[in-house]
Image (cartoon, grey):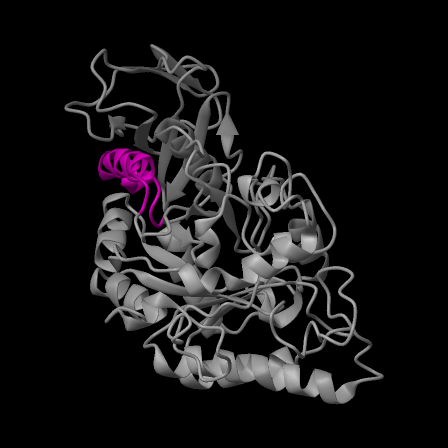
Amino acid sequence: MAKRDDIVEHSLADSIGYDTYPGWLKARLEWFMDMRFGMIIHWGPYSQWDCCESWGLVPQQYAWNRSDDMKCWVERGRDFERFTRDYRALNRTFNPVNFDPDKWAAIAQAAGMKYVTYTTKHHDGFCMWDTKTTDYRITHPDCPHHASPRADTVREVFDAFRRRNMAISCYFSKSDWHCPWYWAPQFEVKDANVNYDRLKHPELWARFVDFVHCQIKELMTDYGPVDVLWLDGGQVRPPGQDIRMDEIAAMARERQPGLIMADRTVGGVNENFITPEQEIPDKPLGIPWESCITLAHKWKYVSDDVFKPAGQVVKMLAETVAKGGNLLLGVGPSPLGEIPRDAESRLREIGAWLKINGEAIYGARPVAPYQEGNVRFTKKGGIIYAIVLPDAGGTPPDNIVITSFRPAAGAAIELLGGRAALESKPLAQGFEVRLPRELPGPHAWAIKFRAE
């Protein structure tokens, strides 16, 4: 999947700045940034196909939304009308009989994740909760899963993760390509935007705005404590597509005190943190941020997708935290409702690393110069953590030279998970430390010391 440079560029340009936030919001964001590692779950009827989620419905064709390496596209004769008709009907065959949110939460917890972001509705408009606003929902009789005692997946997922003391982030797409008041059937759909002039048809737009408000109100009222409202569909913004976001924020926070808002790419008071996609910024951004990156190549489940090695994710996590961000790792359950085995094995391996080195990640903050060679720095108060990455072949170095810091007089230099203080010697600038032959696990190694 491609990087989304527009997210950082728009958000930074339009950001009101962290320093202007009220005290309660700063405190909540500090709490959020302490968690450092979460899971984003893309799941819905689209998991039955090998295309990407939602975007195949847009008339423009790209390599990533409809292409000849996608069986679902080729089998329909590359016929866009047939493709969209059949995509819309995927709800009629969606029956995830192995859906077990408790197992999802257990896997996420074993991975060392502290929160979940769940797609309650993607751009295609299919609702994964028991909404009263549309029949295009998972609890409607058209969908086989409606008969399951776990039919309302939003309730089930939120409750399962809360039971493991994990925070809840509610993904919601503002754009809705099923709603007749966003993509009105009497007008041609040209792109991802609303397909009519809202100034000429204010009655349609008013109904759409009310539709969005009602859906978010349901999610903020009926589904227990929610920590983050994660809003996608950044084209839905003033002036051209104004849905009165300030009113939504006020309504949501009345029901969810302390709610953090992430109105992606829009900037202003309702984008409390920035969400780079499929990339880690080159440097700290100066305000809270969270990189969302897939564990495999795609956000959603594809049967033959290839997952990143655990060591690559560990490096991404160290890189992200060293620059002050959170890592939101994307996982797509199967049509049956299962997290793929290869994904689970990677996640458990990452969790094993965090059991040893989590002290350098959770609650840590960036410290300049953030990195030095193959070392990434984090800090807690006067304690510095130097996370040592292996070379391209996965081999750790024998010695590490750090020129950016010097240990305080008499301070021990420790290896997290190690058995004894490390051997070191001062240099004219910084110090040199020797790693032991037997290291506590693979992927990366965190050195801890108090700086002078």
Residue in the foreground of this view, choosing between 195 and 392: 195
Q: Which residue does the image show at 46% across and 81% down from the upper left?
A: 253
Q: Residue furthest bottom?
A: 203
Q: Which residue does the image show at 32% across and 57% down from the upper left?
A: 96
Residue in the foreground of this view, choosing between 215 and 426: 215
The reply to whether residue 100 is visible in this rendering is: yes
Does 354 appear in magenta? yes
Q: Where residue 46 appears, x then y in whole percent?
A: 48, 54
Q: Residue furthest left?
A: 419
Q: Is 104 rendered above or below residue 213? A: above
Left or right of residue 146, residue 61 in this image: right
Q: Where residue 394 appears, x then y in whole percent?
A: 38, 16
Q: Which residue does the image show at 33% across and 24% down from the upper left?
A: 443
Residue in the foreground of this view, choosing between 388 and 311: 311
Left or right of residue 383, residue 52 in this image: right
The reply to whether residue 452 is visible in this rendering is: no
Q: Where residue 68 appears, x then y in whole percent?
A: 63, 35
Q: Where residue 234 appears, x then y in whole percent?
A: 66, 63
Q: From which residue to which does the magenta span run?
A: 339-363
Q: Which residue does the image show at 25% across and 54% down from the upper left?
A: 98
Left or right of residue 413, residue 317 in this image: right
Residue in the foreground of this view, choosing between 402 and 442: 442
Q: Is 349 rendered above or below residue 439? A: below
Secondary structure predominantly adopted by residues drawn in magenta: helix
Picture quarter with the C terminus = top left
Does 52 appear in magenta? no
Picture quarter with the N terminus = top right
